Image: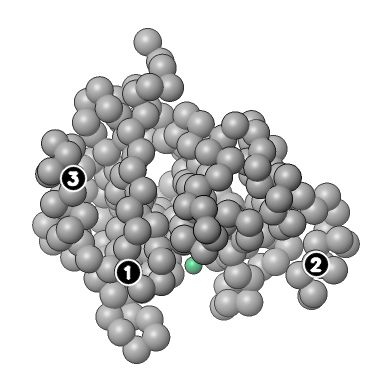
Amino acid sequence: METQDDLYIEQLLCGPMQNFVYLVGSKRTREVALVDPAWAIDPLLERIDEKGLTLKAVLVTHYHPDHCGGHMMGQEIEGVAALLERKGVKIYINKHEADGLRKVTGVSESDLERVDSEDALTLGDVEIRFLHTPGHTPGSQCFLARNALVSGDTLFVRSCGRVDLPGSDPAQLHQSLRQLAGLPEQTVLYPGHHYSEESQSTIGQELATNPYLRVPTEEMWRELMGY
Ligand SMILES: [Zn+2]
């Protein structure tokens, strides 16, 4: 029987850039995926042990080192490469982001599952759907599990991801946000950073308060974003 109740989701604040790492999976089977593991891998694995969970997969929203590890702003951030030294799991990455992830983290092709929009991973009774949401980066993806949307740097509480970085595309981000705006209003938003006072929200709340989520035309979007 499919019930909302089987969804396990836990939000963990990690590192100096206010990143959110997530555990998403099944309460029944205790199988989970780690979303965007970075900054300190051992404490994340200890958390999984402490809770009696089994790590089955790593899901990466996009290839920026604060989400997956690598070299950024003069420092080496621990991430998926360190995790794979300890756990034999696959990294689920959008096919448009996979080469970038390899370059940034040094993982090999055999460590990856290149996924497409609408592919899914099932843990227990919980299906985690991959949604390609380009704009912040070419292969950014969000994860939709039951009524939970893990949105990476595509959509934040009251704001959205930057589009002034290499590989960013403001017009694509607009399309991706239009897609997310069409999700049921009760969908719970779990963002990639703690950039607002609130650590989570809902699509309904964001439609009412987030100026970036409710721009109907590209012309209005260009005006808002100034490009
Ligand atoms: Zn980013």
Counting every numbered tag in the picture gives 3
Residue drawn where x is 23% and y is 41% of the image? 56
Among the two numbered marks 2 and 3 on one chain, the one whose residue lies closer to the N terminus: 3
Q: Amino acid at mark 1?
A: Gly
Q: Is residue 95 visible?
A: no
Among the two numbered marks 1 and 3 on one chain, the one whose residue lies closer to the N terminus: 1
| Residue occupied by mark 2 | 224
Q: Is residue 59 above or below residue 81?
A: above
Q: Which mark is residue 15?
A: 1
Among the two numbered marks 2 and 1 on one chain, the one whose residue lies closer to the N terminus: 1
Q: Which mark is residue 27?
A: none
Alpha carbon separation for disc pair 2 and 3: 42 Å
Alpha carbon separation for disc pair 2 and 1: 31 Å
| Label 1 CA crowd tier, 10 Å (few <14, some 14–19, many 20+) | few
The spot of residue 113 in percent (x, y) is: 34, 49
Q: Could you tell me which secondary element the residue under label 3 belongs to?
A: helix
The reply to whether callout 2 and callout 1 are in contact (CB within 8 Å) is no
The spot of residue 42 in percent (x, y) is: 15, 60
Q: Could you tell me which secondary element the residue under label 2 belongs to?
A: helix
| Label 2 CA crowd tier, 10 Å (few <14, some 14–19, many 20+) | few
Alpha carbon separation for disc pair 1 and 3: 18 Å
User: As rendered, which of 158 and 180 lies closer to the eye?
Assistant: 158
Q: Quadrant of the C terminus?
A: bottom right
Seen as rendered, the residue at the extreme right is: 219
Q: Is residue 210 left or right of residue 165?
A: right
| Residue occupied by mark 3 | 48
Q: Is residue 216 visible?
A: yes
The spot of residue 99 in percent (x, y) is: 41, 66
